[in-house]
Amino acid sequence: MHIYVVTILVVLLSIISLVMIIVGGLYLIENRALVLWALLALAFMILGAIGTNSVPHEFFGIPERFSVFAATGFNAVLGVYLFNGFKGEKDANE
């Protein structure tokens, strides 16, 4: 049940939230760096999914870490943005 329900929901919600952050951030000039972080995380998630199906079974866990650490790393980036009050690049330099 965990693989079929929880994992699918987590992956879908992660992809949807990253896409929404990317689309929403494109309209706000002050958060362009957050859009780049979200694009990077989404790219690593996709590369991890592709890699798990393309490597031998013995090395399955290595590309899977790309997906896991992409989501974890983006959560860390969001934490830094929250700590700084989502100040834009112009506000952070002042």
Image (tube, rainbow, N blue to C red):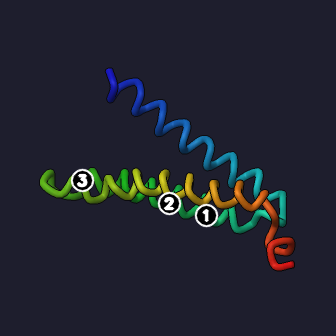
Q: CA distance from mark 1 to mark 3?
A: 23 Å
Task: Give the residue type that dot 3 points to.
Answer: Gly
The structure residue drawn at horizontal position 35% and vertical position 25%, both measured from the top left corner, is: 4
Q: Is residue 8 above or below residue 88?
A: above
Q: Earlier in the sequence, mark 1 or mark 3?
A: 1
Pointer 2 or 1: first along the chain: 1
Which amino acid does the dot numbered 2 rest on? Answer: Ala
Q: Nearer the viewer, residue 8 or 75?
A: 75
Q: State the residue position of label 3.
A: 61
Q: Look at 55% across and 36% down and name the residue there.
A: 13
* Residue type at tag 1: Trp
Callout 2–callout 3 Cβ contact below 8 Å: no
Query: Which mark, by number, is residue 43?
Result: 2
Most distant residue in the front direction: 83
Q: Which quarter of the picture shows residue 62?
A: bottom left
User: Between residues 2 and 92, which one lies in front from this camera angle?
Assistant: 92
Q: Give the labeled residue for mark 1.
A: 37
Between marks 2 and 3 in the image, the one whose residue lies nearer the viewer = 3
The kind of secondary structure element at disc 3 is: helix
